[in-house]
Image (cartoon, grey):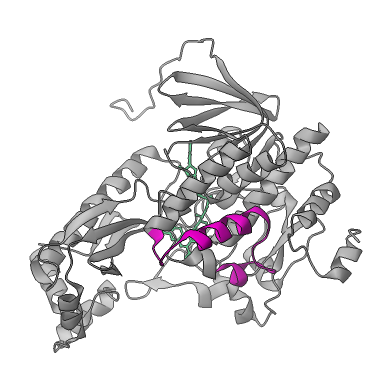
Amino acid sequence: MSENGAAEYVVEPQKRVPVAYDVDVAVVGSGIGGLFAALAAGKQGAKTLVIDRMAALGGNIGPAMIVAGGLYNEADGTLVGGLSGIPKMVIDMIEARRTANNYADETSMVSYLGAKLSEEWGIELLLTVWAGDPIMEGNRVTGLFVEGKSGRVAVKAKVVIDATADVDIARRAGAPVIMASPPDPAHGPLVRERRGGEPYRVWNDTALFYMVAGVDFAAYEAFAATRVPLSDADREWVRGRNPGSFPQPLLPLLRQAWEDGSFRHMRDMEPTVHTESAAISQFDGHVGSSRLNVRGEIRREDMKQHSKIETAARVHAQETLHFYREHVPGFEKAYMLFMVPYFGARGGPCIDGERTVTAMEAYEGKKFRDVMYRNIHEGQDMHGGEKSGHDAPYRMIQPKEVDGLLVTGRGAAYIRRGHDPTGMRARPSIMALGEATGIAAALSTKLGVTPKQLDVKTLQRELLRQGAYLGDEARLAELGLR
Ligand SMILES: Cc1cc2nc3c(=O)[nH]c(=O)nc-3n(C[C@H](O)[C@H](O)[C@H](O)COP(=O)(O)OP(=O)(O)OC[C@H]3O[C@@H](n4cnc5c(N)ncnc54)[C@H](O)[C@@H]3O)c2cc1C
């Protein structure tokens, strides 16, 4: 910005950009949605390229390590019929290989298996690169620019899948996106509150996972099991500051540190964004783990804010450990083992799709004729609905106004998103969504049509062949699939 606040620009000189790849399907983002989209497209025989800014595959279930055993135990609770197809195959492979409930190992295995299966199915990987602008012909995406060590290259693709979780490609392609959604007052019981009653936005918080080593957990547990008297002032402070995950004997110390300014477990970064540390708990042996939470209005498209938050979260995590080392028995010799390389998010922006699924439709078990699978919404029973789930329609991965592009994962068109009952952002749902997206992209290229032109019954038949659950026999007959 110039001194008077006006935006300054430079004009980028026109240049010839080499075409580094010409593929059927380019998948941008190899997170939960992108990885399964790529594997599905590749297995269908499409010439597939995966692009990711990280060096390892898997996103939130890869380098970001958001697992905690959930890969195995959440599927039945979030997908009618449980996992199927490639997600089931991959999770079964991990299940067969893992020796303990150890998500450091499991997330590395996701990256490993992703790489091995990509090799087996002829999927090319282009990692440690940033996806840039889409290449457009009219309203159709026909590829994208990618920036890496070689400079800028072009990728031509018949179908591009935006699996960046932040709708990076769709946004730049000019597709309508929904950048923020306030909590819906109609769902009051699901809207959590923070800091003594201030309404808490339902939708876009995140966390940075870290591990510490060198902890004597026997000494720590003996400390955590004690009880210290709390004064009225302590209780008042606790009510307003939400240190709920910390052990009771630590609370007066946390308050004291807060008041003398030596350590604060909650820190405001901006009026609407704060970081929040949580207790460090035992992971395995002398190793502990925790998450540094970031809550509030995270603008996923704002790189300056992003950089500030990444830095603040890392500083805060480190200082949480310093506090433990000074005050908590068992942590005297603890040290930082590692922090994950990026924080993901639970919510964030999404496309305004050809069909954007609303929270109420999810609760009410809405059915769509272009169903790809059925998602269970945890909140359904709160509204007296049956836990029979709701349909995820093919149109929710199609952006409005733009063709040649499908959007999967967190960026797909469903409203219920953030730190709320599973909605459609839970890992098993995102895996199923990814697989369905990859199959749709591969079928489009095979049949020589755009994703919007793809006959949904062709997709549905293939999904059924892969074991997806689209409904009971009566429903399948109603849809003309029996
Ligand atoms: C703190 C936290 C807690 C969670 N808890 C749960 C839970 O309890 N249960 C549950 O089921 N799910 C949980 N999740 C999962 C979550 O809710 C998401 O819905 C899910 O991870 C979304 O998957 P995705 O594939 O869309 O995104 P991601 O897995 O984040 O993948 C996005 C990928 O895109 C890449 N990328 C992004 N932009 C670019 C670019 N421009 N160029 C190149 N690469 C790019 C990233 O590197 C990444 O690999 C949690 C997530 C977080 C962050």
Q: Is 7 positioned to the left or the right of 431 in the image?
A: left
Q: Magenta region's main secondary structure?
A: helix
In terms of depth relative to the viewer, which is nearer, 474 or 304?
A: 474
Q: Is 471 positioned to the left or the right of 313 in the image?
A: right
Residue 413: in sight, yes or no?
A: no
Q: Is residue 92 magenta?
A: yes
For the image shown, how many numbered marks are present on the structure? Answer: 0
Residue 190: x and y in percent read 52, 74
Residue 141: x and y in percent read 66, 29
Residue that appears at 31% across and 25% down: 2
Q: Is residue 416 above or below residue 113?
A: below
Query: Magenta residues, as a range?
Result: 74-103
Q: Is residue 477 above or below residue 164?
A: below
Q: Is residue 479 above or below residue 235?
A: above
Residue 21: x and y in percent read 59, 22
Residue that appears at 58% across and 50% down: 409
Q: Is 392 positioned to the left or the right of 210 in the image?
A: right
Residue 226 image-quadrant placement: bottom left
Residue 295 image-quadrant placement: bottom left
Q: Quadrant of the N terminus?
A: top left
In terms of depth relative to the viewer, which is nearer, 49 or 317?
A: 49
Residue 90: in sight, yes or no?
A: yes
Residue that appears at 82% across and 58% down: 369
Q: Is residue 450 magenta?
A: no
Q: Quadrant of the C terminus?
A: bottom right
In terms of depth relative to the viewer, which is nearer, 401 or 115?
A: 115
Residue 66 image-quadrant placement: bottom left
In terms of depth relative to the viewer, which is nearer, 182 or 113?
A: 113
Residue 401: x and y in percent read 71, 37
Residue that appears at 41% across and 17% down: 10
